[in-house]
Image: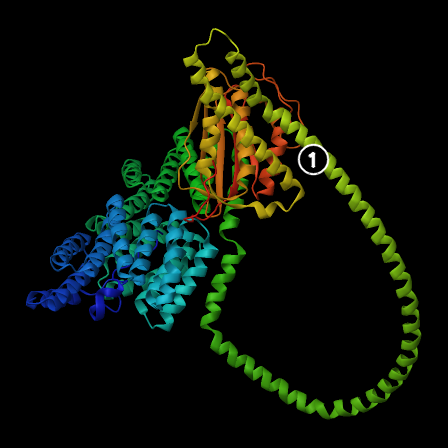
């Protein structure tokens, strides 16, 4: 059920020699013809050298699903020849082929390095198609590693580029891989959307290879929905086309899919025959993904045949390969398979442990299919352990998950797909029905004309009555309009009075907030300055010591002045349009500034204050407001931590639109009853580790500022272990003139 793996083989610069079906395997005679052309080529000049290099790259692409090691050999040969004549396009194309073979063999780090080099060369050549194909290979690679967010990111980057190039085959390939990502996530409805887009392009182009390949993918969805006969129909079609074109990868995938359907139908011996053929091909091609997944399939077959030793051998091989290969999808399948095997052997403790691990991984993958099967095995293990109440709850959860997998939307889309094929016949039927309706209409038209005459007489009488009624109605409406106008005047006056009352109330709240902020945030720096100046009055301090204190005092004065400026800006933001103050700024600059200013205060309590924020994170918000929030959260952390505690400030991109910032401490923490009160109203501020006090208003201001910045704020805490505050703000765009706030 892994789906058929598709690779992007050639870039636009392969010129006229590129194969017409470059996304799919070709027959051996084409490989032989390419070798013959290479053997007879006599590269006497640069033109012939370029032609030879293009042929070598084509041969490398042709070998992808026959023998990936040959792809690596010919790709490296093309690079060596290209460097001799400084042929940049030849190097880029060869790197693309090599990276495809490397990620297929599980060499992800090497594949990423070569893809980055290829993208740099294609960018230099302004070859958009080459860049798009690199992005598709990136998407395939991350899909194989079950890193679905990154896979979708690259595929979505590739799609508009390929659409702009009007390359239907590449567009169809991109659609298909996006469908495979959503299928891996268990989102069958979205997977079908993209499979259909790819399928209709294949049908339009009369590309039977692409069409058969999509049939295999749609078969996967049908298999998940347990529509086994229809799934087998699609798989056998794909197998026939794969045999006709000597497509080893397609043959292996189809054999695997057929074996899985037979296994689901409890035909274990027949399933083992097909799965054995599939794993032989996977081993021959060094396909780690295939080896892991098919080993798990074979292990489950033998488990149901009560051949436990052989079952565990295959399942442990599957798990070990998935861990080595860093494939979370395959690892989850192996874990659930082990849980199934131990449940069959009534070793419920081991079954429970493996099922728990499988469910945890399924949650990370957000895959309903894996989660449903893990929950089912947990249900059986708990029932075997005598925990019937928990087992019953899990059985209800399993039923819910199965219903979600077989949702009406997916069934409707399968039905819609079938309707597309029958559209013409139905259209003819509709036209015939319409013709019959027209005949019936012509028969009735004469009768309707007679009826219209009598209706005209009745209508004339109704018009006369309506005119009389209308005049009386208009008179009444005029009177009502006058009354309505007077009523609106009274309501407008009332609204004006309400608005003035609201403004006065807002000003009163602003005054209270201002006083609280001054008490909360200005006391600490002023107290520090007072202490410094008290030391300066000490006659025992030498001139050198006095000079050493001056920079420290100036720094505190500068920070206090900056705080007052920020506070004034915040006051203005409460009365003006806050949204106009948002701009792009460096999150690192703001956090580092606040961390530096509180290093001394933290050090006095024996606290370690760390800043792990990266330099390249740009936010879109009001920087002064964000500084107030960070300052409040850092001072709160210092207040409730003591000697040898650690405070960590971090920030990273949560998704394409949001930045997540956290301030974590290892201090005294908060009880649950205190957590639920935060951010809701003024609370009694607790006493700090050095008997520090506060107003209890700081977190309310933080919540107000973050929500005005289109973000959210929350907290997690465990009593005695520490507290971590989180807040989000919108992600900005990097610009050369981004203002660095200091």
| Horizontal and vertical percent position of residue 364 | 43, 40
Q: Is residue 72 left or right of residue 185?
A: left
Name the side, left or right, on which 367 lies relative to 106: right
Which residue is nearer to you in this view: 176 or 246? 176
In the rendered image, the residue lying farthest to the top is: 540
> Quick check: can you spot residue 279?
no
Residue 521 position within the rendered picture, expressed as x and y whole percent measured from the top left: 59, 26
- In the foreground, 630 or 463: 630
Q: Residue 36, position in %: x, y?
A: 9, 67
Residue that sits furthest to the front in the current view: 543
Against 61, residue 565 (above or below) is above
Q: Which residue is mark 1?
A: 510
Q: How many other residues sit within 10 Å of disc 1, few (<14), some (14-19) or many (≥20)? A: some
- Between residues 7 and 589, which one lies in front from this camera angle? 589
Tell me where residue 192 sits by quadrant.
bottom left
Locate residue 228, reporting x and y percent: 41, 57
Q: Residue at x 40, y 62 (%)?
A: 160
Q: Is residue 550 left or right of residue 247?
A: right
From what the image shows, is residue 188 above or below residue 684?
A: below
């Amino acid at each position: 059920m892994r789906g058929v793996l598709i690779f992007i083989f050639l870039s636009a610069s392969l010129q006229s020699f590129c194969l017409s079906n470059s996304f799919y395997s070709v027959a051996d005679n084409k490989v032989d013809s390419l070798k013959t052309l290479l053997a007879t080529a006599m590269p006497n000049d640069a033109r012939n050298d370029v032609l030879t290099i293009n042929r070598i790259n084509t041969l490398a692409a042709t070998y992808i699903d026959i023998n990936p090691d040959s792809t690596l050999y010919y790709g490296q040969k093309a690079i060596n020849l290209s460097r001799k004549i400084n042929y940049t396009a030849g190097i880029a194309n060869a790197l693309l082929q090599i990276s495809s073979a490397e990620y297929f063999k599980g060499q992800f780090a090497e594949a990423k390095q070569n893809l980055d080099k290829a993208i740099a060369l294609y960018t230099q050549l302004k070859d958009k198609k080459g860049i798009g194909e690199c992005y598709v290979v990136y998407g395939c690679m991350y899909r194989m590693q079950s890193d679905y967010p990154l896979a979708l990111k690259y595929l979505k980057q590739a799609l508009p580029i390929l659409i702009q190039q009007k390359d239907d085959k590449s567009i169809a390939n991109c659609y298909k891989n996006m469908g495979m990502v959503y299928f891996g996530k268990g989102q069958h409805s979205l997977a079908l959307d993209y499979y259909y887009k790819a399928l209709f392009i294949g049908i339009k182009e009369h590309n039977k290879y692409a069409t058969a390949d999509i049939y295999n993918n749609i078969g996967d969805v049908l298999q998940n929905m347990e529509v086994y006969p229809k799934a087998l129909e699609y798989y056998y079609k794909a197998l026939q086309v794969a045999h006709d074109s000597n497509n080893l990868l397609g043959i292996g995938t189809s054999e695997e899919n057929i074996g899985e359907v037979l296994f689901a139908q409890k035909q274990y011996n027949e399933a083992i025959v097909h799965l054995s053929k599939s794993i032989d091909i996977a081993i021959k091609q060094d396909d780690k993904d295939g080896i892991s997944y098919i080993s798990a399939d074979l292990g489950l077959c033998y488990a149901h045949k009560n051949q436990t030793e052989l079952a565990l051998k295959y399942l442990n091989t599957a798990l070990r390969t998935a861990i080595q290969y860093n494939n979370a999808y395959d690892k989850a399948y192996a874990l659930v398979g082990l849980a199934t095997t131990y449940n069959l052997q009534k070793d419920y403790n081991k079954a429970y442990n493996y099922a728990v691990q499988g469910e945890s991984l399924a949650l990370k993958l957000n895959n309903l299919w894996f989660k449903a099967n893990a929950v089912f095995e947990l249900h059986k293990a708990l029932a075997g352990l005598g925990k019937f109440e928990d087992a019953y709850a899990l059985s209800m959860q399993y039923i819910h998950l199965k219903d979600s997998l077989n949702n009406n939307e997916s069934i409707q889309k399968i039905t819609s797909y079938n309707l597309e094929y029958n559209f013409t016949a139905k259209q003819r039927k509709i036209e015939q029905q319409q013709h019959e309706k027209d005949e019936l209409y012509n028969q009735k038209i004469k009768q309707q004309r007679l009826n219209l005459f009598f209706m005209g007489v009745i209508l004339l009488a109704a018009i006369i009555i309506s005119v009389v009624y209308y005049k009386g109605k208009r008179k009444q409406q005029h009177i009502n309009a006058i009354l309505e106008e007077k009523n609106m005047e009274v309501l407008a006056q009332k609204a004006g009075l309400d608005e003035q009352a609201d403004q006065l109330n807002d000003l009163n709240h602003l005054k209270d907030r201002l006083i609280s902020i001054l008490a909360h945030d200005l006391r600490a720096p002023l107290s520090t300055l007072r202490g410094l100046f008290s030391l300066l009055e000490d006659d025992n301090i030498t001139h050198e010591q006095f000079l050493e204190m001056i920079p420290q005092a100036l720094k505190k004065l500068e920070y206090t002045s900056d705080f007052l400026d920020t506070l004034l800006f915040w006051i203005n933001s409460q009365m003006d349009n806050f949204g106009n103050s948002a701009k792009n700024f460096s999150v690192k600059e703001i956090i580092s500034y606040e961390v530096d200013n509180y290093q001394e205060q933290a050090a006095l309590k024996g606290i370690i204050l760390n800043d792990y924020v990266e330099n390249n994170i740009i936010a879109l918000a009001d920087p002064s407001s964000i500084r107030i929030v960070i300052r409040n959260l850092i001072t709160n952390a210092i207040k409730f931590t003591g000697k040898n505690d650690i405070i960590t400030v971090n920030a990273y991109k949560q998704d394409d639109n949001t930045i997540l910032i956290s301030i974590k401490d290892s201090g005294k923490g908060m009880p649950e009853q205190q957590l639920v009160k935060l951010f809701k109203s003024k609370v009694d501020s607790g006493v700090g580790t050095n008997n520090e006090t506060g107003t209890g208003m700081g977190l309310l201001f933080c919540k107000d500022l973050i929500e005005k910045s289109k973000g959210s704020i929350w907290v997690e805490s465990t009593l005695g272990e520490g507290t971590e505050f989180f807040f989000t703000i919108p992600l900005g765009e990097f610009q050369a003139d981004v203002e660095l706030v200091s």
